[in-house]
């Protein structure tokens, strides 16, 4: 967490060092100091993998559409690493600094998020609410949409919240909750009901709520003095942020059980006795909401935060070598956190190699910036299949938080030709998102890809749920509505396609686009093993194959996938599109090429590539 003061250039150097040490996310404050977006843009230029969040932009000083523009611009310059932390702030900032009435904070925040999300989806913005009317009624305005194209249709929006209604709102519709003065031992009692109520109203289209909390971290046998460093800040918030009747931080500390202390701190602070107010902050409170003490104690505090529901540990490192402190914390979090992989195997993390999160961030950044990275299997010798699926899952979760919609799955490496081409000996699978789908004959700009190749495949559309393990071919045939031809565009974020099994698994099975044929054909009377396929580029035949090239029968690709997903309780759902695997070795493509795959019994599909 970067505070309001300090030299921004020196802070950027420090963040770059923290990034090298394993930092995942940096939060930039604003208050009534430097504006956060300027500093965030500067950090984007000085870093490459760390996510950059605002903590916070208040919902009074900027219009919702300007906040959306800010989010889009930051996400673009950072290569998809922006996180927008919003909040109502408080009367001290909103009224005293910005000169705006502090009215309807809960409802206003929800309206802001709704408008921002519509704008980032590049929809014409129309909103008629108590706080905002866009376009302004009775004037010459008309609904407008964002002219620029941000790299993501949704930038994660986290809400800073303390009161029950605000926390409930964050749990209901935000991507994350930014807590403050968070006491793990008191969290369930203070916020449990609000979080539960919000979760009950949460849309199934949103990923699980991220919870950000933490505090100052100092490690050593004699470091309690670090807590004295934060006393003035605690006194400011508990005593000076608002008046005697309106101070959310003071209310929170009272709910923690420090009623007399909170009242005393506020009285002293508002009477101008700031040093006495700082001295009155109880040591027990400081210890509860920070991580300061011997290594064993700090590890216990990390676990306490985790057990209370915190997903993102926010820290302010204090010590002679803050970067080394970040590295140690990263290692402890990695070692202590039990991670279940899709295959049930332990995930190895920490040590001298990049972490699982860092590898996932590399792939995400490479995709957004259309660059390549060294093979993950070379960066981390011995990278396991379980590790690779965990990396894939991290980026799938990120896409869901960014507004992505899962529409199916793909099975890869099912043909001998593809296994030999990539030097692997087993299939893999990846996730299909709605923005990957392309209609038959629509053009695909290669400028949005890195090193594309094409594969002709048989795809199935699910009619009923299919859950493994123990799925038979007959079960699979009964669960599908039919089959259709597709051309899958695969694209590796790994340099020169120098990939092994773990590289392609981590890279979401190298999937980029899926061009669908227009007709789903019932296959009750079709022998999928013998259907022939001819692939042409600009009218010239480049490959031929039969369905038997896919595990002996394309339906076996579906069976393999259902069984594999069933191992950890996931099923294929009605409406899912499932790619059974390529019939042939992949073929490179470039702008100006027209690719046609013609299947017996199923028809054809065309993909046109533009420069």
Image: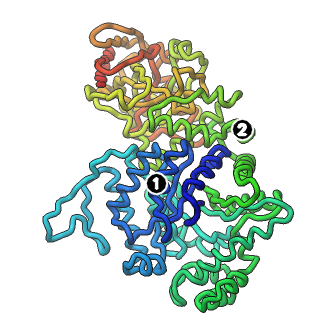
Report the coloring of the rendering: rainbow
Q: Is residue 107 left or right of residue 303?
A: left
Pointer 2 local density, CA inside 10 Å: few below 14, some 14–19, many at least 20 = some
Evaluate whether residue 605 shows in this view: no
**What residue do we see at 58% from left, 63% from top?**
6
The tally of labels here is 2
Q: Residue 351 sits in which quadrant?
A: top right
Where's residue 138, x and y in %? 14, 71
Label drawn at residue 348: 2
Q: Quadrant of the N terminus?
A: bottom right
Where's residue 493, x and y in %? 50, 29
Q: Which residue is mark 1?
A: 156
| Depicted 76 relative to depicted 471: above or below | below
Q: Quadrant of the C terminus?
A: top left
Where's residue 394, x and y in %? 56, 43
Q: Is residue 244 left or right of residue 332?
A: left
The secondary element bearing badge 1 is classed as: loop
Q: Is residue 67 left or right of residue 427?
A: left
Q: In 3D space, how far apart are the residues under numbered discs 2 and 1 (Cα atoms)?
A: 28 Å
Pointer 1 local density, CA inside 10 Å: few below 14, some 14–19, many at least 20 = many
**What residue do we see at 31% from left, 15% from top?**
598
Judge by depth and name the residue closer to the eye, 121 or 527.
121
Judge by depth and name the residue closer to the eye, 575 or 109.
109
Judge by depth and name the residue closer to the eye, 459 or 378.
378
Evaluate whether residue 458 shows in this view: yes
The secondary element bearing badge 2 is classed as: loop
Question: Most extreme residue toward the right, as rendered?
Answer: 221
Point out the tag, 2 or 1, that comes first from the N-terminus.
1
Q: Residue 274 sits in which quadrant?
A: bottom right
Label drawn at residue 387: none
Q: Residue 591 sits in which quadrant?
A: top left
């Amino acid at each position: 967490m970067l505070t309001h003061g300090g030299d921004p250039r020196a802070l950027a150097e420090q963040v770059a060092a923290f990034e090298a040490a394993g930092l995942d996310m940096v939060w930039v404050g604003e208050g009534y100091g430097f504006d956060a977006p300027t500093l965030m843009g500067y950090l984007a230029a000085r870093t490459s993998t760390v996510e950059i969040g605002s903590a916070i932009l208040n919902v009074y000083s900027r219009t919702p559409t300007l906040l959306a523009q800010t989010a889009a611009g930051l996400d673009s310059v950072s290569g998809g690493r922006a996180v927008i932390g919003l909040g109502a702030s408080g009367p001290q900032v909103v009224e005293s600094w910005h000169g705006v009435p502090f009215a309807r904070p809960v409802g206003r925040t929800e309206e802001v998020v709704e408008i921002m999300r519509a704008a980032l989806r590049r929809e014409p913005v129309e909103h008629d609410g108590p706080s905002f009317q866009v376009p302004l009624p009775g004037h010459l305005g008309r609904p407008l949409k964002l002219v620029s194209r941000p790299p993501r249709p949704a930038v994660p929006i986290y809400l800073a919240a303390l009161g029950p209604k605000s926390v409930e709102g964050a749990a209901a519709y935000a991507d994350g909750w930014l807590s403050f003065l968070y006491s793990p031992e008191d969290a369930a009692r203070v916020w449990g009901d609000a979080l539960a109520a919000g979760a009950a109203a949460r849309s199934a289209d949103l990923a699980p709520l991220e919870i950000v909390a933490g505090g100052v971290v100092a490690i050593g046998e004699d470091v309690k003095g670090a807590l004295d460093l934060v006393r003035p800040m605690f006194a400011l918030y508990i005593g000076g942020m608002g008046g005697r009747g309106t101070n959310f931080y003071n209310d929170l500390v009272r709910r923690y059980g420090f009623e007399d202390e909170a009242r005393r701190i506020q009285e002293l602070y508002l009477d101008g006795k700031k040093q006495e107010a700082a001295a009155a902050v109880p040591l027990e409170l400081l210890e509860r909401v920070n991580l300061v003490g011997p290594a064993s104690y700090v590890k216990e505090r990390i676990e306490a935060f985790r057990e209370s529901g915190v997903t993102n540990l926010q820290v302010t490192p204090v010590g002679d070598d803050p970067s080394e402190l970040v590295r140690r914390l990263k290692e402890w979090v990695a070692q202590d956190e039990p991670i279940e992989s899709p295959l049930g195997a332990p995930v190895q993390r920490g040590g001298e190699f990049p972490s699982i999160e860092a590898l996932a961030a590399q792939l995400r950044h490479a995709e957004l910036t259309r660059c390549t990275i060294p093979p993950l299997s070379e960066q981390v010798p011995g990278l396991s299949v379980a590790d690779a699926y965990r990396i894939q899952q991290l980026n799938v979760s990120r896409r869901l938080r960014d507004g992505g919609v899962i529409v199916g799955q793909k099975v890869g490496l099912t043909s001998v030709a593809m296994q030999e081409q990539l030097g692997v000996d087993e299939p893999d699978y990846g996730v299909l998102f709605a923005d990957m789908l392309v209609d038959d004959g629509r053009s695909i700009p290669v400028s949005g890809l890195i090193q594309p190749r094409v594969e002709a495949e048989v795809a199935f559309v699910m009619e009923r749920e299919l859950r493994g393990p123990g799925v038979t071919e007959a079960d699979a045939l009964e669960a599908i509505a039919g089959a259709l031809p597709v051309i899958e565009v695969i694209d590796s974020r790994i340099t020169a396609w120098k990939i092994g099994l773990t590289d392609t698994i981590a890279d979401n099975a190298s999937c980029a686009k899926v061009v669908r044929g227009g007709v789903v054909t019932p296959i009750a009377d079709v022998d999928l093993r013998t259907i022939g396929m001819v692939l042409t580029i600009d009218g010239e035949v480049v490959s031929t194959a039969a369905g038997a090239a896919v595990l002996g029968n394309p339906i076996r690709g579906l069976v393999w996938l259902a069984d594999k997903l069933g191992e950890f309780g996931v099923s294929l759902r009605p409406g899912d599109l499932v790619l059974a695997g390529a019939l042939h070795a992949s073929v490179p493509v470039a702008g100006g090429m027209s690719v046609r795959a013609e299947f017996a019994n199923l028809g054809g599909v065309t993909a046109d590539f533009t420069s």
